[in-house]
Image (cartoon, rainbow, N blue to C red):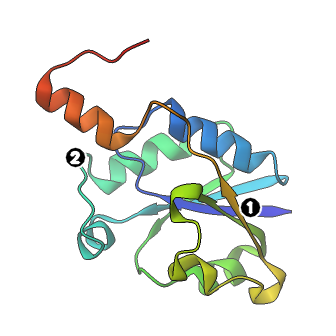
Amino acid sequence: MTVLTYGTFDHFHWGHLNLLERARALGNRLVVGVVSDQVCSEKNRTFSTPCEERLAVIKALRCVDEAFVQLELDQKEKDIDRFSARYLVVGDDWKGHPRFEQVRGYHGVEIVYLERTPGISSTLIRQRIKDQTPMQT
């Protein structure tokens, strides 16, 4: 069973890894869409690392079977078909968002919302860098 997820994965951290490993455990193949710089801009999302570098990190992970660049904001149905995805995994901060709920049940896909890893986020890392405050361990 193929599991599909998307992310910006800026300032890649252990929360990202945790989400990807939990997503991979839901099936036998994990496909990850890395949000392009253009789509990030359309979503008003900030990022520091260019897409090709973020994609290289994701491709290097053992838990990821395939990775690609998400070029359009609303391409989920196309990707579900392209990869024959059974699950669409999303962080629970997106729970109920129409962008994901609109594909619920599309070709039998199940949406799985995974809880975020507490105490870590790209936003927090950017703020720590700005403030030059060390991360708490």
Which quadrant of the rendered structure holds the N terminus?
bottom right
The residue tagged with tag 1: helix, strand or loop?
Answer: strand
Mark 2 residue type: Ser
- Residue 72 horizontal/vertical position (percent): 41, 81
Question: Which tag, 1 or 2, sits closer to the chain's start?
Answer: 1
In the rendered structure, the answer to whether residue 52 lies left or right of residue 23 reads left
Mark identifier at residue 76: none
In the rendered structure, the answer to whether residue 121 lies left or right of residue 124 reads right
- Residue 134 horizontal/vertical position (percent): 26, 15
Read off the residue under disc 1.
3
Q: Disc 1 and disc 2: Cα gap in Å?
A: 27 Å
Q: Is residue 60 visible?
A: no
- Above or below, 136 against 8 in this view is above
- Above or below, 5 against 135 in this view is below
In the rendered structure, the answer to whether residue 14 lies left or right of residue 27 reads left
- Residue 109 horizontal/vertical position (percent): 78, 77
Which quadrant of the rendered structure holds the C terminus?
top left
Read off the residue under disc 2.
48
- Residue 110 horizontal/vertical position (percent): 78, 72
Q: Locate residue 31: give its quadrant.
A: bottom right
The residue tagged with tag 2: helix, strand or loop?
Answer: loop
Q: Locate residue 40: give its quadrant.
A: bottom left
* x 80%, y 87%: residue: 107
